[in-house]
Image (cartoon, rainbow, N blue to C red):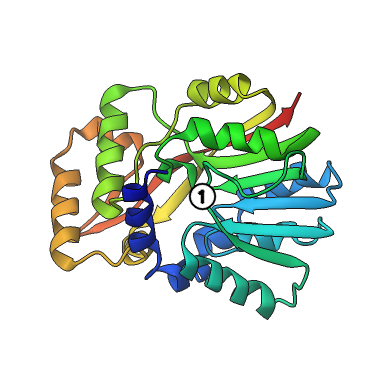
């Protein structure tokens, strides 16, 4: 990440670390279960979870790995993740502060690398994917999940604006074809992919980012004024206030050649 964007991510997520540990969206679900199923098939000895956030993915993979490394660029997030895993009695984890574009690990260090719900914050996805390829052992698996970018330009612009108004560190969600091209270019072969829809309760989603009342009202006004096809595409449920919406998640299993 660029230094400016790194600071933006840190300022956005440092104060919200505890909220991410408490987030039901991140704690589990069909998406995390799928990643764990893929990971179990590799019987990994060493696993890296980068951009670990509140630590839920690291916690889920701790049962599979003899050694687990959780990495994040935001120190308060690392402290929150450490607290979660210690609370659950997980001791075989090391916590590392670092940038996804410069992973501080040796070549061929891990059988599995995971990254869940974070790539839309990366200033440049290409270097991160190439670093994943470098630290994976031959035959190792990269298990990645993120918001799926939309092929329709109007819908993509609408939901990106919604995301950025809530979270200024949000950059973009990548389309499936973009992900597959980046992975292939880095020497990773996509072996499996899944697309899931996930409902987002609006109040929880907004509260996690500590939006002011004025910013929340402005965002709701923007959504109400948008073309109906935009609201319908993301299943916005709107009464007196916005109640929920749904986004699509892309899960990929890619292996090092």
Count the labels in the image: 1
- Nearer the observer, 198 or 52: 52
Would you name the residue on which mark 1 appears?
99
Res 43 seen here: yes
Across and down, in percent, residue 66 comes to 84, 59
Quarter placement of the N terminus: top left
Q: Is residue 225 above or below residue 257?
A: below
Q: Is residue 28 visible to us here?
A: no
Q: Give the residue displayed 83% in from the left and 48% down from the top.
A: 44
Say whether residue 243 is left or right of residue 35.
left
Quarter of the image for residue 151 reads top left
Label 1 Cα crowd, 10 Å radius (few <14 / some 14-19 / many 20+)? some
Q: Position of residue 82 (x, y in %)?
A: 61, 72
* Left or right of residue 224, residue 137 in this image: right
Q: Position of residue 237 (x, y in %)?
A: 31, 50
Task: Give 2 or 36, whichever is nearer the viewer.
Answer: 2
Please report the residue visible at 57 percent of the width from the left and 42 percent of the height from the top: 145
Q: Residue at x 17, y 67 (%)?
A: 213
Q: Residue at x 81, y 56 (%)?
A: 65
Judge from the rendering whether residue 128 lies leftward or rightward of residue 149; answer left or right: right
Give coordinates of residue 205: x percent, y percent: 37, 59
Image quarter (top left, top right, bottom left or bottom right) of the C terminus:
top right
Front residue of this view, candidates 5 and 222: 5
């Amino acid at each position: 990440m660029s230094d400016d964007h790194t600071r933006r991510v840190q300022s956005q997520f440092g104060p919200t670390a505890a909220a991410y540990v408490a987030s039901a969206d991140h704690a589990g679900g069909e998406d995390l279960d799928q990643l764990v199923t893929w990971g179990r098939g590799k019987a990994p000895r060493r696993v890296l979870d980068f951009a670990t956030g509140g630590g839920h993915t690291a916690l889920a993979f701790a049962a599979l790995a003899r050694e687990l490394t959780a990495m994040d660029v935001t120190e308060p997030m690392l402290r929150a993740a450490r607290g979660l895993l210690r609370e659950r009695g997980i001791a075989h984890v090391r916590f590392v502060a670092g940038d996804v574009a410069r992973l501080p690990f040796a070549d061929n260090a891990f059988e599995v690398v995971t990254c869940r719900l974070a790539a839309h914050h990366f200033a440049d996805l290409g270097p991160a994917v190439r670093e994943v390829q470098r630290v994976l052992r031959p035959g190792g698996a990269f298990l990645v999940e993120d918001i799926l970018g939309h092929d329709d330009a109007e819908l993509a612009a609408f939901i990106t604006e919604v995301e950025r108004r809530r979270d200024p560190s949000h950059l973009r969600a990548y389309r499936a074809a973009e992900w597959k091209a980046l992975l292939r270019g880095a020497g990773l072969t996509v072996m499996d992919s899944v697309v899931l829809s996930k409902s987002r309760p609006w109040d929880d989603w907004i509260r996690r980012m500590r939006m002011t009342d004025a910013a929340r009202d402005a965002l709701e006004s923007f959504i109400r004024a948008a073309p109906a096809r935009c609201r319908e595409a993301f299943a916005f449920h709107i009464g007196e206030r916005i109640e929920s919406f749904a986004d699509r998640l892309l899960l990929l299993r890619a292996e090092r050649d």
